Image: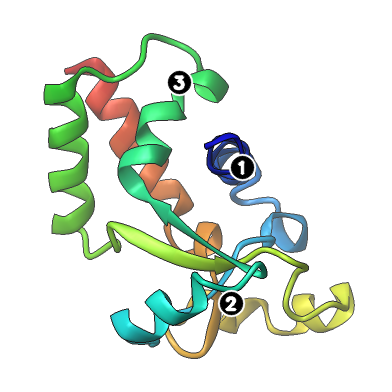
Amino acid sequence: MIRKTLLTAATTVGLLATGIGAASAHECYIANRSAQGNAGASHSANWYTLQMSDLFAEAHLFFGGEPLTDAQLAWALEQTKAQGIPLSVTMFEKFTIPRSVEKLEGLSTKSSDGKGVDHFFSRYGDALFQIFSAAQAR
């Protein structure tokens, strides 16, 4: 439980870094991997499966305000799904892929193209923050 809370909190911090370029690309995932592949990867110590419900439930700790109510959380998850954002994502947490900042910057146009290795918050961070903010305002 503690590991899950710490990993979710660390992942939420990734939302804060959205838009900072290479420094924000810590949460790598395989964009086109199957649900079965994600389930298999989640058994490895190098991969972590983040549920968007957990992300939204703890986002107030970093962005302020009150935690989302059950109704707000349900609305946020509906909006997440409607925007095509996965409700869970299995991310590589051992190190940034690629390891080199130079290579990462060279791949910046490919880091959120929905193919191969992408960086979750590069691709979805802004939308998730907007959904969270709108849910808090409801």
- Cβ–Cβ below 8 Å for labels 2 and 3? no
- Mark nearest the camera among 2 and 3 is 3
Under mark 3, the amino acid is His
- The colour scheme is rainbow
Q: Is residue 114 left or right of residue 85?
A: right
In the image, farthest residue toward the top: 66
Q: Which mark is residue 111?
A: 2
Query: Looking at the picture, does residue 79 appear above or below residue 33?
Result: above
- Mark nearest the camera among 3 and 1 is 1
Residue at image location 61% in from the left, 42% down from the top? 3
Q: Which residue is mark 3?
A: 60
Under mark 1, the amino acid is Arg
Inter-mark Cα distance, 2 to 3: 27 Å
Q: Where in the figure is residue 88, as x and y percent of width and height?
A: 34, 59
Q: Which residue is mark 1?
A: 3
Q: Is residue 33 left or right of residue 85?
A: right
Sequence order check, earlier mark of 2 and 1: 1
Sequence order check, earlier mark of 3 and 1: 1
Under mark 2, the amino acid is Ser
Secondary structure under tag 1 reads helix
Q: Is residue 116 left or right of residue 77?
A: right
Sequence order check, earlier mark of 2 and 3: 3
Secondary structure under tag 2 reads loop
Which quadrant would the C terminus be assigned to in this image? top left
Q: Quadrant of residue 130?
A: top left
Query: Looking at the picture, does residue 111 appear above or below residue 66?
Result: below
Q: Where in the figure is residue 73, as x and y percent of width and height?
A: 21, 30
Q: Which mark is residue 84?
A: none
Q: Is residue 5 left or right of residue 102?
A: left
Inter-mark Cα distance, 3 to 1: 19 Å
Query: Looking at the picture, does residue 95 appear above or below residue 64?
Result: below
Q: Quadrant of residue 82?
A: bottom left
